[in-house]
Image (cartoon, coloured by chain):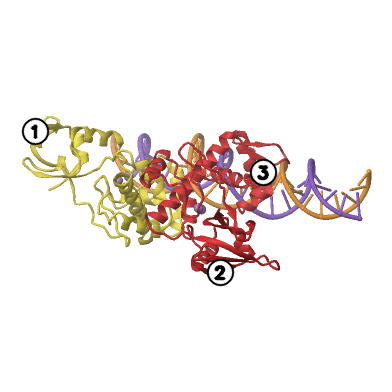
Chain colours: A yellow, B red, C orange, D purple
DNA sequence: TAATATTTTTAGACTTGTCTAAAAATACAA
DNA sequence: TTGTATTTTTAGACAAGTCTAAAAATATTA
């Protein structure tokens, strides 16, 4: 239906739209590690196909049709990640690149059967919600640890940084999804956070606190 | 590692090599539903990369390197087909097109884990042997029904035509893999074959007998 | 063996998606 | 508000893969 490049652009625009309403050419170029001029070319094509709203120099947003395509790609990505972790026993830091390829397998019947095979999981291995076959899913209501108050208590439920380096660090510290933690102290000097977990104390940096999400 | 187009050409050349040692430009063009001139262009690239032996006007054969790539693609194709039928409960006539896309997912670690997950199956849903992770597999020793003698008895074990139409016809007649049949009579006039199966008689045309394989 | 038919290759063009360099538009700041 | 910095678009080129039309090589047949 859509080319690999088109799908990747739509996904990138969708992701950037979660932060700011309107997405700029340079933001898309950075997200896809390409050049602004290439982005402009593709934006004209996507606008032509009514997948984005685009006026020169004004940035873009997805149309309803474009958003539907993007959400479907995200559904595929997250279901394949779930499959790789739950069925093939890959670690959560190993699956993203494979899913980047698998998300472009076009059959929706396949993805719906995969969903059923796995029991309709609601979140992927990184805590991100998986859209259902109609594209419905709850927006993430998780909060970065850096944004909660001292004495707050919650369950580790997601990450904002999906890099291997970060995920491996978390695993090593035992900071995995499902763990209950309490924020004991926030150091004013460098915004480091001291957590209590399994009745032990653990200090994490501001960067880590920013990228680790909890459900209160 | 290799582009989608390169992989598809190598697979096509491999398939045609099973029939005749040397493969012609026109044969490849027919197999891939493309034009001879396009094939020539690609043959130069593949020869450049040492994946095929090619001299102008003389046809091509795979090098060892090329054969290794081709067998690996076939391994992926057949394992995904097995997955789709055994785990996602697709019918054997529904899986080929999906597998055509999935065979290009590049991770070998993924395919090895998929293989393990399914218990290292030896044949795909159409009876074709699945190469192991080193590329070893038994060449098909199956015979078309049209080539065996009257009173021969065997197990339906594979097909030569993988089209939906043929597979659906077989299913409807109950001619599925694993069934035991006996060749009762071969009609001299049109080479139709009368089979005995489940102690009932069943007539199939020469075309069907040509494309249905049994293990004696 | 010479003429003809078929196959294969070359030449040149097109599409998709990318790039660099330069021009145009917009944003920011004195 | 005018000049400068930044962002975005345009212009032109390139690589991969495909096509049509024509030329070259090979095969067939009289
Ligand atoms: Mn991912
Ligand atoms: Mn994920
Ligand atoms: Mn197949
Ligand atoms: Mn098959």
Figure quadrant of residue A121: bottom left
Per the image, label 2 sits on a secondary structure element best described as strand
Dot 2 alpha-carbon crowd within 10 angstroms: few under 14, some 14 to 19, many 20 or more:
some
Front residue of A58/A142: it is A142
The x and y percentages for residue B181 are 53, 61
Front residue of B124/A40: it is B124
Q: Residue A200, labelled with which disc?
A: 1
Left or right position of A22 against B143: left
Q: Chain of mark 3?
A: B
State which tag comes first along the sequence, 3 or 2.
3
Figure quadrant of residue A155: top left
For the residues bearing labels 1 and 2, Cβ distance under 8 angstroms? no
Label 1, label 3: how far apart the Cα atoms are: 68 Å
Q: Chain of mark 1?
A: A
Q: Give the residue at mark 3.
A: B40
The x and y percentages for residue A170 are 22, 35
Label 3, label 2: how far apart the Cα atoms are: 47 Å
Identify which residue is drawn at 20% across, 35% down.
Answer: A208
């Amino acid at each position: 239906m859509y080319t690999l490049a088109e799908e990747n652009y739509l996904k990138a625009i969708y992701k950037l739209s979660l932060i700011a309403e309107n997405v700029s050419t340079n933001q898309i170029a950075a997200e896809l590690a390409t050049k602004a001029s290439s982005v402009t070319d593709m934006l004209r094509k996507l606008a032509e196909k009514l997948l984005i709203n685009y006026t020169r120099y004004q940035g873009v947003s997805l149309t309803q049709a474009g958003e539907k395509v993007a959400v479907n790609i995200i559904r595929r990505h997250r279901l394949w990640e779930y499959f790789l972790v739950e069925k093939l026993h890959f670690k959560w830091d190993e699956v993203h690149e494979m899913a980047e390829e698998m998300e472009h397998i076009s059959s929706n019947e396949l993805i719906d059967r995969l969903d059923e095979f796995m029991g309709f999981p609601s979140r992927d291995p990184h805590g991100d919600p998986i859209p259902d076959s109609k594209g419905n899913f709850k927006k993430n209501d998780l909060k970065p640890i850096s944004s909660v108050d001292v004495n707050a208590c919650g369950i580790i439920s997601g990450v904002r940084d999906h890099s291997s380096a970060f995920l491996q660090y978390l695993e090593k510290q035992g900071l995995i999804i499902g763990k209950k933690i309490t924020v004991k102290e926030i150091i004013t000097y460098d915004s480091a956070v001291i957590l209590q977990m399994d009745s032990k104390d653990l200090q994490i940096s501001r960067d880590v606190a920013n990228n680790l999400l909890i459900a209160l």
